[in-house]
Amino acid sequence: MSSPQDPFYIVREEIQGSIGKLQTTFHRWEQVSSNTGEYVHLTKELLTSCESIEWQVDELEKTISVASRDPAYYGLDEVELSKRRNWTGSARNQIGTVRRAVEKGKSNPAMARHQDPMGTSRTNHYSSQDNDDYIASESDRQLLLMRQQDDELDELSASVQRIGGVGLTIHEELSGQERILNNLSLEMETTSNRLDFVQKRVAMVMKKAGIKGQIMLILFLVVLFIILFVLVFLT
């Protein structure tokens, strides 16, 4: 399988793109003075990118090595394997060239300055200006980050206040419901006490009245019920 859908070609395109970005950064690094903070930043970025891309090339070479053990199984031939080996070798050479140049420039920054003694003052002037520009840029970036953090904190504070307001409202509603339940409980207790008192009074009256008195009271209540029924339902 040597079509563009082959995983090798997909990974190769990704690595090629990374190498392109690496070379762009390298050309920028070559134009920056070695006495600036940007130079140090680009140096670290280039070395890190070289390590990452080399690791990807190593993994790609491992897949080529596995495929070379049984090319027919993977739908490959020796010509295709040779092309793939040549490409990984070329990629490794490009990465190695950048790495060696960066490591050499990193370890010998003073040598480059001594090679042009007539331009020392001019270089120092530009280096100082570049440092000032870099510091100013970093200061602006830090101020922007602080503003963003302040805005986020303001939004968080507003959200906390809204949540607090909702919590207070819920607390007030619960307190009101608790007062209502307490009043209802007190009224029920009062009613229960009154009912107990009435029941006791009725029991005392029934006991004093005797059997005849009880019969007369029952007849009276029946008559009263009939009268009330007629008044309510028949009139």
Image (cartoon, rainbow, N blue to C red):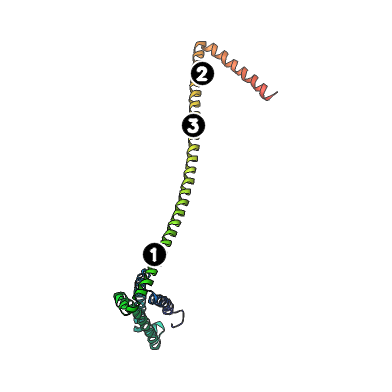
Residue 52 in sight in this render: no
Residue 135 bears which disc, if any? Answer: 1
Q: Amino acid at mark 2?
A: Val
Residue 179 bears which disc, if any? Answer: 3
User: Does label 2 or label 3 sit earlier along the sequence?
Assistant: 3
Question: Which residue position holds label 2?
Answer: 198
Q: Amino acid at mark 1?
A: Ile
Horizontally, is 195 left or right of 130 in the view? right
Quadrant (top left, top right, bottom left, bottom right) of the C terminus: top right
Horizontally, is 48 left or right of 212 in the view? left
User: Does label 2 or label 1 sit earlier along the sequence?
Assistant: 1
Q: Nearer the viewer, residue 116 or 39?
A: 116
Q: CA distance from mark 2 to mark 3?
A: 29 Å
Residue at disc 3, secondary structure: helix
Residue 114, quarter of the rendered image:
bottom left
Name the residue at 40% across, 82% down. Answer: 74
